[in-house]
Image (cartoon, helix red, strand yellow):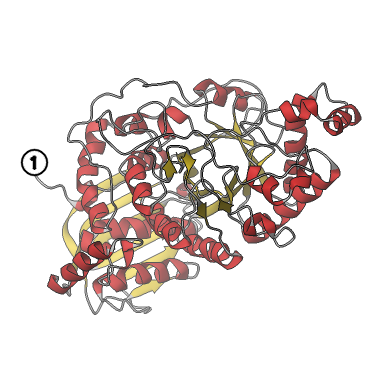
Amino acid sequence: MPVPRRDQALLPRPTRVSLRSGHFTFDATTALHATPGAEAAADLLRDLLRPATGLPLPTSPSGTVTLAVDPGLRGLGREGYGLTVSPHSVLLRAAHPTGLLRGVQTLRQLLPEEALVPVTGGHLGHATERERERERERNRERARPDRWDLPCTEITDVPHRSWRGLMIDVARHFHPVDTLRRHVDLLALHKLNVLHLHLTDDQGWRMPVAAYPRLTTIGAHRAGPDGAGPPGAPGSSRRGPLPHAGAYTRADLTGLVDYAARRGVTVVPEVEMPGHVRAALAAYPHLGNHPDRVLDVWTRWGVCDTVLGVHDAVLDFVRAVLDEVMDVFPSPYVHLGGDECPTTEWQQSATARARVAAEGLSGPADLHGWLLGRAGAHLRDRGRHPVAWAETGTVLPPGFTAMSWRATAHAAEALARGHDVVLTHHRTTYLDYAQDEAPGGPPVQPGPVVDLRTVHRGDPDPRTSAPGAGRVLGTQAQLWTEFAPTAADLDRLAYPRLCALADRAWSGPTPWPDFTRRLTAHTRRLDALGVRRHPTPAAPPEATAARTAPSP
């Protein structure tokens, strides 16, 4: 099969591409010309290309590579761009600076894949010493060219969805900020614009909160197993999770936010409530329904039955945590978790029953929506939008953005109730599930097989004719990390399936043969970047049926 031109192997696929003959050459004389508003994109292009190519790419009014913001290009929206490559010049235009950042990534993909990688091998992240030595050897053998060709082309590109993301669970297993920065770079390359960080859960609390220091001094440390766990799982013994610890500093998180913003990626924080809070209650037992009970950070996987209390001290805690979250993360969206919340403790608690009576609720089960509603109101009063996992389409308080994960019908139900929706159906976006039926592979989350073609096909868009319906904002993939304690595990689970989600989120549905042809060429880029991906089958079969029912 002939190797396609690089402008025919872009991933995600642009809206429109017109092939032209000839090429433009980047060399030591190439300079960048940035119009007002385009300076950040020009700086990013230089910072990304200079370590790999050695080209200085200075700024000059007579530069042959022009980056321009033109608000009159309203049809491109916030993230669209137009790119014209001719033999003697390159013109990248957008209506908004963010669109230029998307175009910068297209320019990178139009260059040979060697232009993606610094000659120092800086993208190796947490590679083994043997991998680093092999990279050093390749660098010694590689003669860096002094000319880099772009194919002449004309591209107009506008995204299908505004929310295109990846959730990484850093609560079950902590992943250092360097690993997260590397994933930000990979997200940006694929024009994904959201990194959703699942920062807290029963098994660990990873974000510092100044008013509650024990959240990380105690809540970030998990002891050895004390119960049944899946045998053979990474990070687990036969009796449960292995001892584990880790927390970010405030500087880690603000630095990550800034790093991502330069690449057009928003970091959306998630702090779980009212359930999935065992780590917080291990640090501060008085926030639970049994204030005198001493708890540990949970040493099992699954859903813990300990939940937040509903007394005034808990409301103070929630407000303090959310204030710190908003101070660190400027994202317009803040995720509050909200799912898998057992109500047994509330049913047995006199304090909870008194709250039910005082608030005029119908029973303890309504405390879930009441507490989320109070937290969501605190965010909205400060100009933020609350987000939560939606176990059905009808349980979230008004004003929440719903992430519908259990069933496709729930997305339509949430839309009909006026919620905006991010599509996160577990059967098409959960990348911790197996990606094939091959025996003897690494342990994965019990559940359906979610192979490459399943992710590429996605789910039909939910529809509703209800007045005042919400909007489908977009979609994102989920990487729950019970079975992913290392950076290599994240790579293997995410790629190449995340490429399929990126293609669908940016381009809309694309023909399977077209996608696989582009992916075959794109894997050379992933390999150059040192992505330790799952093997890509030559012709993936139709999506297979679920092996087991999803975990509750």
Residue at x-position 39% and y-position 44%: 234
The answer to whether any part of residue 15 appears in the image is: no
Hey, which quadrant is residue 546 in on the image? top left
Look at label 1 and name its amino acid: Met
Please name the residue shown 70% across and 37% down the image: 307
Q: Is residue 233 left or right of residue 355?
A: left
Between 191 and 530, which is closer to the camera in this rendering? 530
Instruction: Quadrant for the C terminus, please.
Output: top right
Q: Which residue is mark 1?
A: 1
Is 535 displayed left or right of 327 in the figure?
left
Residue 435: horizontal and vertical position, in percent?
Answer: 32, 33
Asked which secondary structure carries label 1, the reply is loop
Q: Nearer the viewer, residue 56 or 89?
A: 56
Q: Is residue 207 left or right of residue 365?
A: left
x and y, in percent, of residue 453 in the image: 30, 30
Q: Residue at x 61, y 24 (%)?
A: 393
Q: Position of residue 256 (x, y in %)?
A: 51, 62
515 up-or-down from 128: above or below: above
Q: Is residue 27 above or below residue 107?
A: below
Q: Position of residue 318 (x, y in %)?
A: 75, 48
